Image (cartoon, grey):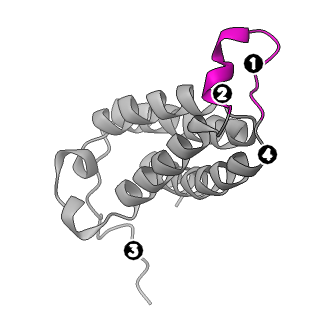
Amino acid sequence: MGKLIWNQWARLIALTAGTFEVIGGIFGIFYRYSMFKDVLKDIDFLFNPFNVVAIICIVFGLIVLAIELPLQFLKNTIITTSFIPRIILYFIISAISVFNYQNVNPALYLFIATLMYVRAAMNGENNKVNSNLRSRV
């Protein structure tokens, strides 16, 4: 007891971020607003007449959920067995989804999950289930 398993904690945070990413994208379709609307006037085409970033965020949220659950066709692929592709993909997703106002929190959650996966990779963890960590009841 007492050993923190970083990749399992990061997985739960990423699942939460993926769920909120989909929900925020759906809300972003109906309520168009950019975080940087006042600063960057040139990105207004992404939000009018419909919110392109919100649709992209819905797709990104579904991708995160498909990776973390994982879906049957993604099992035992490089993206589900290694941390490095997740780190790169989640960093890109969090950097893009911060532009939509409704997806700022999921972007921060996904960035935190990315940092947790970095820590898990530095500690030498893997995605294999350790039989010593299971409870024996």
Mark found first going from the N terminus, 1 or 3 = 1
In three-dimensional space, the C-alpha distance between marks 2 and 1, rounded to whole angstroms, equals 7 Å
In three-dimensional space, the C-alpha distance between marks 4 and 1, rounded to whole angstroms, equals 15 Å
Mark found first going from the N terminus, 2 or 1 = 1
Judge depth for marks 3 and 4 and give the one in front.
4
First to last magenta residue range: 33-48
In three-dimensional space, the C-alpha distance between marks 3 and 2, rounded to whole angstroms, equals 41 Å
* Callout 4 crowding tier (Cα within 10 Å): few <14, some 14–19, many ≥20: some
Dots 2, 1 in contact, CB < 8 A = yes
Q: Which disc number belongs to residue 99?
A: 2
Dots 4, 1 in contact, CB < 8 A = no
For the C terminus, the image quarter is: bottom left
Question: Is residue 17 rendered to the left or right of residue 135?
Answer: right
Q: Which amino acid does label 4 sit on?
A: Tyr
Dots 1, 3 in contact, CB < 8 A = no
Q: What residue type is labelled 2?
A: Phe
The residue tagged 3 is 134
In three-dimensional space, the C-alpha distance between marks 2 and 4, rounded to whole angstroms, equals 14 Å
Dots 3, 4 in contact, CB < 8 A = no
* x 56%, y 40%: residue: 110
Mark found first going from the N terminus, 4 or 1 = 4
Judge depth for marks 1 and 3 and give the one in front.
1
Disc 4 is placed on an element classified as: loop
Q: Where is residue 19 in the image (x, y as percent from the top left)?
A: 59, 59
* x 40%, y 51%: residue: 63
Q: Nearer the viewer, residue 54 or 108?
A: 54
